[in-house]
Image (spheres, rainbow, N blue to C red):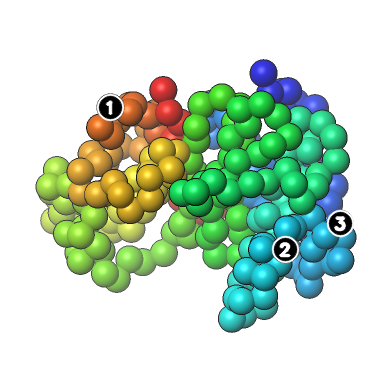
Amino acid sequence: MMQSWSMAAPAQGMPAPNGLSILPLDATGAPFPMWLVSLSVEPSAALLDLLGAEERQRADRFRTAALRRRYIAGHAGLRLIAARCFGGAAGVEDVVRDARGKLHLRCAANAQCSISYAADRVLIGISEGAAIGVDAEQLRPIDDAAELMELHYTPAERAALRALQRSGQIIDHAFLAIWVRKEACVKALGEGLVIPLTELEIGLQPRMTTVRIGSSGLRTAAIQASGDLVIGWAQTL
């Protein structure tokens, strides 16, 4: 089993070099730990050395320095977190991507991970055994909510959100809570756009629920963290 994260005080986070911040999320209700990672300065050579050649090339293709820093923070942070969870040193070879683009960890048998980018932060989840997915969105006005609902939400989800609108409520949080859980479920299964989101019934309530995609079952929920992030998580049953 994964070592308990009680080995590091959640309020203190993890010591990390050159402006890299790694903060565990507390009281998420998820059956696996999650962290928020950010980088406020240009990455050091030590951080870049943790990335593989393909990752460094991908980082250099970002159009802005902020996006490049965020990508490097996520991939370097993932290795540092994995090393802390499972022991050993963080290394280039500890993160691999399968044929579907899903990230896996080599540092422990059956180690699973998921990563999501939101604003200037990176959400990382790590598990051992069951496949997981995480997704994060910064809470904000959703100007094209109506169009996105038609493209990606089920009839019941659209009806529930429209009922909120008719009652005078702002639906941004509810809209995003559905969205991040759908994305987390898709990531957990590693199927990408093969799964039509209009066929994935999530519902309006953010509390933990069980959903099915084909023959697969998942637990999923949504939370709000760090003030302005709406986070969804999913884990296969």
Name the residue beneath numbered marker 1. Answer: 215
Label located before the other in sequence (3 or 2): 3
Query: Residue 231, image x and y in percent?
Result: 47, 46
Between 10 and 36, the one lying in front of the other is 36
Where disc 3 sits, the SS reads loop
| Mark 1 burial class by Cα count in 10 Å: few <14, some 14-19, many 20+ | few
In this orientation, which residue lies closer to the viewer: 16 or 174? 16
Who's the residue at 24% across and 62% down the image?
148
- Side of 164 relative to 52 (left or right): left
Neighbour tally class for label 3: few under 14, some 14-19, many 20 plus, Cα within 10 Å: few
Q: Which residue lies at the image location 56% right of the left edge and 24% below the top edge?
A: 129
Q: Quadrant of the C terminus?
A: top left
Where's residue 61, x and y in %?
Answer: 61, 76
Q: Across the whole image, how many numbered discs are drawn on residues? A: 3
Q: State which tag comes first along the sequence, 2 or 1.
A: 2
Query: Callout 2, which amino acid?
Result: Ala
> Residue 140: image x %, image y %?
41, 64
Q: Which mark is residue 17?
A: 3
**Residue sticking out furthest to the bottom:** 63
Residue drawn at x 43%, y 43% as measured from the top left: 190
Nearer the observer, disc 3 or disc 2?
Answer: 2
Quarter of the figure with residue 235? top left
